[in-house]
Structures are given as C-alpha cells and as structure tokens.
Amino acid sequence: LSSTALVLLMTLPGLALFYGGLVRSRNVLSILMQCFSIAGIASVLWLLLGYSIAFGIGNDYWGGLDKLMFSGVTKEGLVGDIPESLFALFQMTFAIITPALIVGAYAERIKFSAVILFSSFWLILVYAPVTHWVWGGGWLQQMGLLDFAGGTVVHVT
C-alpha cells in the first residue's frame, strides 16, 4: 500500500473512534458516519476543484482553475522529484483529515446535513486557499513561512 492509503486506513478510523469515545453512546455511529462521509466528499471535492485552487497557477491568494478536474495532471508531470498525481493524492490526505478534525468541535450539536455542507464549503473556501498561501507558492510562502508538518494549513485553519 502507498503511504497515502496507509494514512487514510489508520488515521481516519482512529480519529473517528477517538471522537466517538468523547460522545454519548447513542451518538457514536453519527460521529463515525460524519468522519467517513467527510472523507468521501473531501476526496471528490479535492479531485474536482480543491487541488486546482491550492496548487494551480494563479495569484498570491488563489491558485486558479487551470487544474480543474485534474486537467493537465499527467503521469509524466513532476512536482519536485515525484509524479504530480502522487503529490496530489498525498495532499488530499491533509484535505481529508483537516475537516474531519473539526468534527470534534461540534460533536452532538449539529445535524448530519449541516456537517456535510459546512465541510464542503469550508474545504473550498478556507482550506484550499490557505494551502495555496502556504504550500502552493502564495503570499505566506513568499514571505518565508515554512510549514513542513501542516501546523499552519491544518491546525490554524
């Protein structure tokens, strides 16, 4: 298995079970479904739109839509020394786990449909642009910000 698959196979159930342990027993299944549903929706949104906003060629604040639906991402394309498709999937693990981390903030307080809507809009309007700012050549990266472990992109957002 790739490192991306291992991260998702280990981290997502761990996070879901951790938050499941913090809620009343009648809400454990709801928390598990929220985490796993966010993973599915975040994956699709990342492939359709999020990767382009985060790593497309745009300006200092927005990556643009040149990589919309993985347009121009080929097997031969490289980001550094690795294929761009692998880089995009690695970055997708962060895009999946970040909104799932937010589930703990509103556990037992929000409807499932609201979780899905909030997570979808948050991923596109907050996470992807901040990813561009820090890792995609945006204004924070140009100012010299180094974020190797996701402290700014994942935890600050």
Image: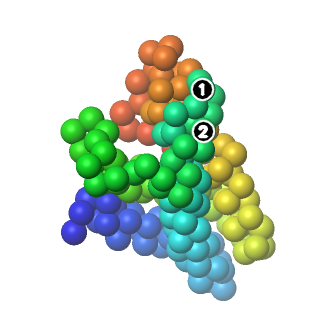
- Dot 1 alpha-carbon crowd within 10 angstroms: few under 14, some 14 to 19, many 20 or more: few
Q: Position of residue 25 (x, y in %)?
A: 61, 83
- Dot 2 alpha-carbon crowd within 10 angstroms: few under 14, some 14 to 19, many 20 or more: many
Quarter of the rendering containing residue 48: bottom right
Residue found 52% across the figure and 33% down from its top: 57
- Residue type, numbered disc 1: Asn
Q: Report the front residue among 14 and 12.
A: 12
Task: Report the quarter where the N terminus lies.
Answer: bottom left
On the question of residue 151 being in view, the answer is: no
Q: Report the front residue among 39 and 21.
A: 39
At mark 1, the secondary structure is: loop
Q: Report the front residue among 75 and 140.
A: 75
Quarter of the rendering containing residue 10: bottom left
Q: Which residue has dot 2 on it?
A: 64
State the count of labels. Answer: 2
Residue found 47% across the figure and 55% down from its top: 70
Q: Report the front residue among 106 and 44.
A: 44
Distance from label 1 to label 2 (Cα)? 7 Å
Residue 129 lies left or right of residue 80; in this view the side is right
Residue 33's place in the image compared with 103, above or below, is below
Task: Report the quarter where the C terminus lies.
Answer: top right
- Residue type, numbered disc 2: Gly
The label number, if any, that marks residue 59 in the structure image: 1
Mark 1 and mark 2 residues within 8 Å of each other at the beta carbon: yes
Quarter of the rendering containing residue 128: top right
Residue 136's place in the image compared with 3, above or below, is above
Q: Position of residue 85 (x, y in %)?
A: 34, 54
Q: Position of residue 103 (x, y in %)?
A: 62, 62
